[in-house]
Image: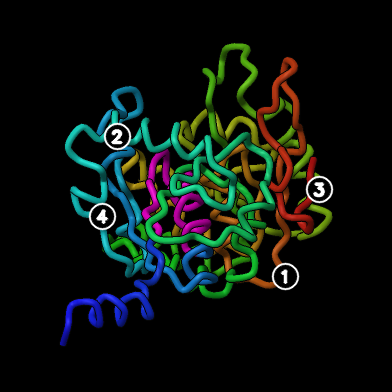
């Protein structure tokens, strides 16, 4: 066949678009990265490729690592070429800067602008290979494919007997998951933790909604978290055996087995509540927005409408 005919045939059947999603941050933010990219791929018949390396290569402060292998995700990992290696930091920077000069619809490197929900992403039609970078912290980015995502984001059960026993305990009662996240020292004044009276108000509200429940406390500092929950010991179980970033998925798995939720100002417990399959679940979340003139939490799109904000 003449060369021009081969080229014409190929042009009539162009390759489907490809989305290369950069994963970074803690487990909750990794899930947001994936969910928004997966929705974009599903609605545009595009291939989704996950960059599980570059977002962690220079994380010297938090030393986080890719954790989505604990989920039922089947998309392939990016090759070195797709991660823009070698000199990936420079090449990524140049791609970002070039795309910023283009109209939103024509960008080949979509980097999140601001923190509020950006409705333009719902109508974006990727052409060719598109890089996606951002936390995209809103259910609105993927609400229309929620059922698919809940299947793909089922957590693989931890293999140890301690988590198995805790799961049985959770399933045996009317369970409320309480997540307490300390961004600042619990004993010092700080602006990043949830307000001091949030958990007492949340427990009071949950007691009215779900009487006689048992509360399972999850936290990066369990003993300090226990002091914030105004309930007798007989009604509380402190979950403290999954400490460390490498065991975060196990705590998240246990959370999803609970029936109701009091979450922290944390994307980790946001996902614990969102992934839980119970249709009648009650979810209470911190309702604050501004801290010292800056947006810290509760920005546009972050909290689903049906959740209770305190």
Q: How far apart are marks 1 and 3 (CA)?
A: 16 Å
Query: Do the CB atoms of the residues marked 2 and 4 lie less than 8 Å apart?
Result: no
- Residue identified by numbered label 2: 91
User: Which mark is first along the chain, 4 or 1?
Assistant: 4
Disc sitting over residue 205 in the figure: 3
Q: What element carries label 4?
A: loop
User: Which mark is first along the chain, 3 or 1?
Assistant: 3
Q: Position of residue 301 (x, y in %)?
A: 71, 48
Q: How far apart are marks 3 and 4 (CA)?
A: 46 Å
Query: Do the CB atoms of the residues marked 1 and 3 lie less than 8 Å apart?
Result: no
Asked where in the image residue 227 lies, by quadrant, the reply is top right
Residue at coordinates 34% horizontally, 22% vertically from top-left?
61
Disc sitting over residue 110 in the figure: none
Residue at coordinates 76% horizontally, 32% vertically from top-left?
288
- Residue identified by numbered label 4: 78
Q: Where is residue 240 in the image (x, y as percent from the top left)?
A: 41, 42
Range of magenta residues: 19-38
Asked where in the image residue 194 lies, by quadrant, the reply is top right
For discs 3 and 2, the disc positioned in front in the rendered view: 2
- Residue identified by numbered label 1: 280
Q: Distance between the residues labelled 2 and 4?
A: 16 Å
Q: How far apart are marks 1 and 4 (CA)?
A: 39 Å
Q: Quadrant of the N terminus?
A: bottom left
Q: Position of residue 97 (x, y in %)?
A: 45, 31
């Amino acid at each position: 066949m003449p060369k021009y005919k081969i080229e014409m045939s190929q042009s009539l059947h162009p390759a489907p678009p490809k989305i290369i999603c950069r994963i970074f941050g803690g487990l909750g933010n990794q899930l947001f990265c994936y969910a928004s990219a997966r929705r974009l791929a599903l609605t545009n018949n595009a291939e989704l490729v996950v960059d599980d390396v570059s977002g962690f290569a220079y994380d010297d402060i938090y030393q986080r690592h890719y954790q989505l292998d604990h989920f039922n995700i089947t998309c392939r990992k990016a090759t070195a070429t797709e991660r823009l290696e070698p000199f990936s930091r420079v090449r990524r920077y140049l791609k970002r800067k070039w795309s910023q000069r283009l109209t939103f619809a024509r960008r080949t490197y979509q980097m999140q602008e601001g923190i509020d929900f950006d409705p333009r992403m719902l109508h974006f039609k990727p052409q060719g290979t598109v890089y996606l970078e951002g936390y995209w912290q809103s259910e609105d980015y993927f609400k229309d494919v929620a059922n698919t995502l809940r299947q793909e984001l089922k957590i693989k059960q931890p293999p140890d007997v301690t988590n198995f026993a805790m799961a049985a305990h959770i399933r045996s009662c009317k369970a409320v998951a309480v997540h307490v996240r300390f961004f600042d020292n619990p004993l010092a004044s700080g602006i990043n933790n949830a307000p001091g009276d949030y958990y007492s108000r949340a427990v009071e509200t949950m007691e009215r909604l779900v009487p006689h429940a048992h509360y399972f406390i999850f936290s990066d500092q369990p003993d300090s978290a226990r002091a914030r929950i105004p309930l007798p010991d007989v009604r509380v179980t402190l979950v403290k055996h999954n400490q460390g970033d490498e065991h975060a998925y196990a705590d998240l798995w246990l959370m999803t087995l609970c029936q109701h939720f009091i979450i922290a100002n944390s994307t980790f417990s946001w996902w614990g509540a969102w992934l839980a399959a119970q249709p009648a679940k009650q979810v209470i979340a911190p309702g604050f927005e501004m801290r010292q003139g800056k947006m810290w939490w509760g920005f546009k799109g972050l909290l689903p409408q049906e959740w209770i904000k305190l």
